[in-house]
Amino acid sequence: MGRSRLWQWVAVGVLALILLAGQSWAIYRFFTSRFPGGNDFWARWYNGCTLLWTGENPYAEEVALRAQIGIFGRPARPGEDLAAFSYPLYTLFVFWPLCLTRNFALALAIWMTAMLYSLLAGLILMAHVSRWSPPRWLWWVTLAWGALHYPHARAIILGQPATVVFVALALSLWALERKRDFAAGALLALTTIKPQMSFLLLPWLLWWTAWRGRWGVWKGFALAMAVLAGASFLLVPSWLSDFIAGVRDYDRVAGAANYRSLTWIITDYIMGWGPPAETVGVGLFALYALFEMWRGRRAAWSGFLWTTGLILILTHFIAPRTATTHYSMLLLPLFGWFAHLQQRLGQRAAWVLVGIEALLLVGQWVVFLLTIEGNFETAWSYLPLPLLLLAVQLWQRRYAWREGGSLP
């Protein structure tokens, strides 16, 4: 029986590889080889792979200059993306096999395929963690919705590594639920490849696990970070200072089409109140996040999930920079809402949830298409989903705690 089961897994693995290879070839043949794109991945792939190809520092200005020429056919002009690496060096460990080819269209096709299935896997895990169990037909609808929803589709098309952070978080929460604490901590370390997505999440999860004496999470996180950072120092001894310098210069590096926090979008971009209003807004959101972290320190699973969902939402209001491609993280509070509606509405919930998914799918694309300026999305595309989920999350607070949470 053991040998039979082993061969079943081998057969499944072979079929999966055939599917991935076939889909990657199709994307390469009909999309990436014909329509240049994937700029978000290009600057990571080219700059990072240069370390393996020629031994050059991925953070070097001359490497970024060649990356700019690869995008624009010339050096970037003021206000354009400077195509800098802009990530911790260990991000390279995620995609280094794609450095075996210098054909970017092929590498991008493989990456897009991997990110699509990572997104779907993360979606399934987030639903499981949130304890949302839709009917089978709604599963298929939700998987299709997940692939087509504007933030997710945009992330895949651009080749955004944010999807890696999302699936790492989903796996970490799944491992945490199953008491596999060391693995949960190690996976949590992988979310640091985009610190602006996890800078609130990390202290919250470590704080909550410390109060519950689950030190395996800390051990897994510490060891994984030591391995990732240590291996990076062996490859490029100056990587940390180079990375920090890039973060400090990110406003210039990212280009004029990028926006700051959602608070900045509301207070400065839309209302025109200026930096003081943004500072006050960010400060208030940060204080509220700290308040909920303190109150949730002894929470059981449902209360923990509610606080985690809130932290993921507030991250976009506090982070110095955010992007719609980061919104896959918001699947946790969204599916938490779905689970709550299913519990309250019973069988009627399925059609209500289909309606919500349809409104989110169509509404987000409509906002994008109606407000697009040239090739760039505008700030209006950033606001609908996090504002909706923030309102829903606050409304759900008493239900989350009542259904198994615990307040001090």
Image (tube, grey):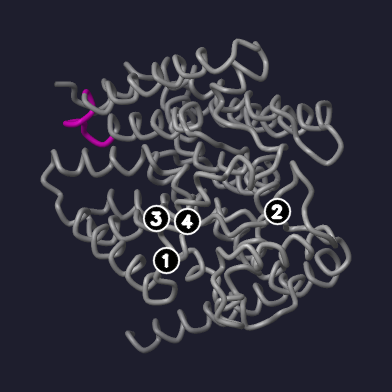
| Disc 2, SS | helix
| Disc 3, SS | helix
Q: Mark 3 points at which residue?
A: 171
Q: Mark 2 points at which residue?
A: 158
Q: Which of marks 3 and 2 is in front?
A: 2
Q: Mark 1 points at which residue?
A: 238
| Disc 1, SS | loop
Q: Quadrant of residue 23?
A: bottom right
Mark 3 or mark 4: whose residue is earlier in sequence: 3
User: At x 87% / y 37%, what residue is drawn?
Assistant: 374
User: At x 44% / y 28%, what residue is drawn?
Assistant: 314
Task: Kindly check if marks 3 and 2 are in contact, taking CB atoms under 8 A apart as contact.
Answer: no
Q: Which of marks 1 and 4 is in front?
A: 1
Question: In the image as oriented, which residue stretches furthest toward the bottom?
Answer: 3
Q: Is residue 144 above or below residue 360?
A: below
Residue 296 located within the stretch drawn in magenta: yes
